[in-house]
Amino acid sequence: MSSPTKNRPATAADAPPSRRPGGLGTRHLTMIGLGGAIGAGLFVGSGAGIALAGPGVLISFLAAGLLAVLVMRMMGEMSVALPASGSFSAHAERALGSWAGFTVGWLYWALISVVLAIEATGAAVIVHGWVPGVATWVWVLVFMAGLTVSNLAAVRMFGEFEFWFAVLKVVAIVAFLVLGALAVAGALPGEGAIGLDNLTAHGGFLPRGWDGVLSGLLAVVFAFGGMEIVTLAAAESEDPARGLSSAMRSVVWRLLVFYVGSVAVIVLVLPWNDSKVGASPFVAVLEHIGLPAAAQVMNVVLLAALLSALNANLYAASRMVYSLAERGEAPKALRARSASGVPRRAVLVSVTFGFVSVLLNIWWPDSVFLWMLNAVGAIALVVWIAVAVSQLRLRAQLEREAPERLKLRMWGFPGLTILSLVAMGAVLVLLVVDDASRPQVIGTGVLTAVVLAIGVLRQRRRG
């Protein structure tokens, strides 16, 4: 068996890439980080969490957000010290061995490939509501084709596209927070102060007890997925270490404020058990404060959020499989880059399942969402666990051999890293015992076992 990379000292080959004129700038990285995590999980998924936990969902979101912040800090530390196109997959390989890099990389690629199809289908459903004469599968095909072309162009074009998509989402959330705060304070014309009554007036702050908070946590924990894309994009930035350090310091806390702040506005403005909150919380709040055509406004924002996430996830999937090819864990043909530096073959391979979902939308339009989600639902948690284990190993190694590279450090190491691992283990147990979540865990477990077995066999053959 080949020697694991965990004992390999830092060398010139691990040095951060040089500046890349024409690549992604710090503003791109910052907005990619923000935009990657602001999607349907917030705009739609928050309603499910509120229905399960009531106002106590604030605790659920805060706990999930803090866990996501800690995982992102770990990713940031490793990516700033050792920038790589495969980010956490490359770090897992270095820390634990090629089997780990192979497993994490392919699992993440599978997750993102399926998420692409889910996002394209979600966007298609919105547009189908506006243009019912055009079938949903046609819109899936249009969106997949359009964003494939975008990702085949120069990386700078992807960065600009994603920057403005993210700006739209951030502006929408900031406007929502401002309007909500004004409504609570009674500063809107013709409206009295709502105050804090809705936090306790309908069964108390924890109407479903702590069991509701835990159920809410399971419903919202994956809403923060997508932040990791910024660490993949950093390898193609003009100054990876500096740009990622700056982006990571600002992104994680802004996201926490956006998520927790938005949910706080919802449970303050409306009773948590209002049927409209469970169906579409943002629309319900905007309608309550008198914004005309609130549903259509939020549909436009949600469409932008889905297309933005689709664009960013396609980028992430292509860079991950490209990195796997670079490390000999995927076909060598996928290492090819265009004159502008885009791994076009990796892009085309990564959109394959998205185009397959066109057929799935024709054959099984009513069940395709659930089928896809159950196949890969808990992979993000597997990736987060791998990130924490890798950071435990690499941090100790870097402190011994190259401490100057630790320009962005994980807080409270190793205590907070270990605490995060314990928390993620607890979430995994909760997912297993929860009837609604168990199919996702089983699907993820089977897929992980298969990919892990292949990765171990490959490493043994190389040895």
Image (cartoon, rainbow, N blue to C red):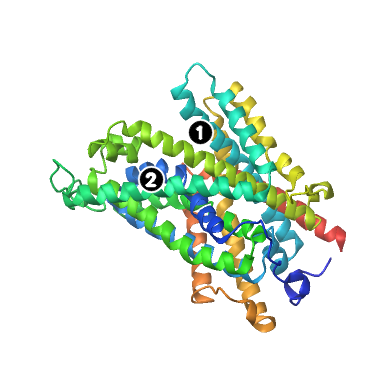
247 up-or-down from 182: above or below: below
Q: Which amino acid is tagged 1?
A: Gly
Q: CA distance from mark 2 to mark 1?
A: 19 Å
| In this rendering, position of residue 223 left or right of residue 365 | left
In the rendered image, the vertical position of residue 321 relative to residue 349, given as above or below: below
Q: Which residue is mark 2?
A: 172
Q: Is residue 284 left or right of residue 427?
A: left
Is 221 left or right of 293, judged from the image as shown? Answer: right
User: Which of label 2 and label 1 is nearer to you?
Assistant: 2
In the foreground, 347 or 325: 347
Residue at mark 1 = 122
Quarter of the image where one finds residue 352: top right
The quarter holding residue 94 reads: bottom right
- Badge 2: how crowded within 10 Å, few (<14), some, or many (20+)? some
Q: Residue furthest bottom?
A: 400
The amino acid pointed to by label 2 is: Ala
Q: Residues within 10 Å of mark 1 (few under 14, many from 20)?
A: many
Question: In what quadrant of the picture does the N terminus appear?
Answer: bottom right
Measuring from the top left, give residue 126's x and y in whole percent: 46, 29
Q: Secondary structure beneath disc 2?
A: helix
